[in-house]
Image (cartoon, grey):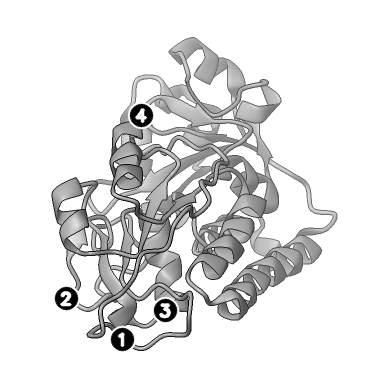
Amino acid sequence: MRLRRTTLLLLPAVLWVGCSRAEPAAAPGKPVRIVSLTLATDEVLIELVPAERMAAVSSFADREMSNVAGKWPAHIPRLAAEMERTLAARPDLVCVASYTQADVLEQLRRNKLTVFRWGFGGLDAVEEHIRLLGKAVGEPESAGALADRMAARRKALAERLAGAARPRVLYLHHGSTAGTGTTYDDIIREAGGVNMASELGLDWYRPMSDERILACDPDVLLLEQDTDGDPVAEAAADRVLGKLRAVREGRVIAIPQRRLSSVSHHVMDGVEQLAKRLHPDKF
C-alpha cells in the first residue's frame, strides 16, 4: 500500500517534435510516440489511443496497484523516470505526474520535448485531467466521453445515497490519514461517509498519533487491501487499533489498493465499493 501526495498542477505542452515516416499514421498534431511515466496516464491512455501510438508506459502499469495490469501489450517498454531510456524512445509527448522530480522535468525541457503533467486533487480534478489529456493526445471526444461516464456514475451514486445517514470514517495507512485536497476525502464523502481527517481540519496526508486515533473513535475504519496480508485481522491484533470500537465491533472495511488509491477514472470502482459497504441497504 502506498500513500500518494496530491496537488492540482498542469504543465502545458510547450513544443511538438516531428515524427519519422515510419511512425503510425495520425492526424496533424496528434502525437504518435507517447511515453507515459505515471500510472494515472497509463490507466487513461489505454482508453484513448491505440497501442501502436505508445512508445512506453510506466513501470507501475503491471504492478498490483494498477487497474490495467496485463492490458498493455508486452512489447511496449515499461519505464520509470529514466531519462536515457525515455529519450531513446524518441517521444513526441511525455506524460508525467505533479510529483515528478524537478530535475527530470528540466531535462525534458532541455531536450525540447512536449510534456503533459497530470495533476492530482479530488474527483473533479480527475475528470478535468482526463479531458486535458484527451486534448493533448488529439482525442478530445473519447476523453470527454470517458469523463462524462465518470460524472454519470458519481451523479447516480449521489442520488442513490440521498438522505442516508453518514457514518464517521477514519482512513489509515501506516499511521497516516488523508484530509482535504485528496482523492480519499472525496471517496469517503461520495461513498456516503464523513471523513474524520477533514472534520479534524487536516489536509493532504498527515500522521496520526496513537492518542489521536483513539480519541477519534470512528464509526468505521477504512484500510487498503494489498495482495498479501489481512488488514482486518492485523487491525484487530494491533495494540492501538484493536482498542477502537469500530474494530471490536467488526466495522473495518478493506478496499483493494488499486481501487482506493487510483487517481484515474478507476477510482469510481473504489467509491462504489465503499458505498456498498457503508450502505448495504441502498443496494
The Cα atoms of the two marked residues, 2 and 1, are separated by 18 Å
Residue 194 visible to the viewer = yes
Q: Residue furthest bottom?
A: 25
Q: Which residue is identified by label 3?
A: 49
Question: Which structural element holds mark 1?
Answer: loop
Residue under pointer 4: 174
The reply to whether the C-beta atoms of the residues labelled 3 and 2 are less than 8 Å apart is no
List the single residue furthest toward the right.
Answer: 163
**Amino acid type, mark 3:** Val
The location of residue 174, given as percent across then percent down, is 35, 29
Amino acid at dot 4: His
Numbered disc in front, either 2 or 1: 1
Which mark identifies residue 24?
1
**Which one is earlier in the sequence, the residue at label 1 or at label 3?**
1
Q: Earlier in the sequence, mark 4 or mark 3?
A: 3
Which residue, given by chain and number where applicable, does mark 2 sit on? Answer: 74
Q: Nearer the viewer, residue 213 or 113?
A: 113
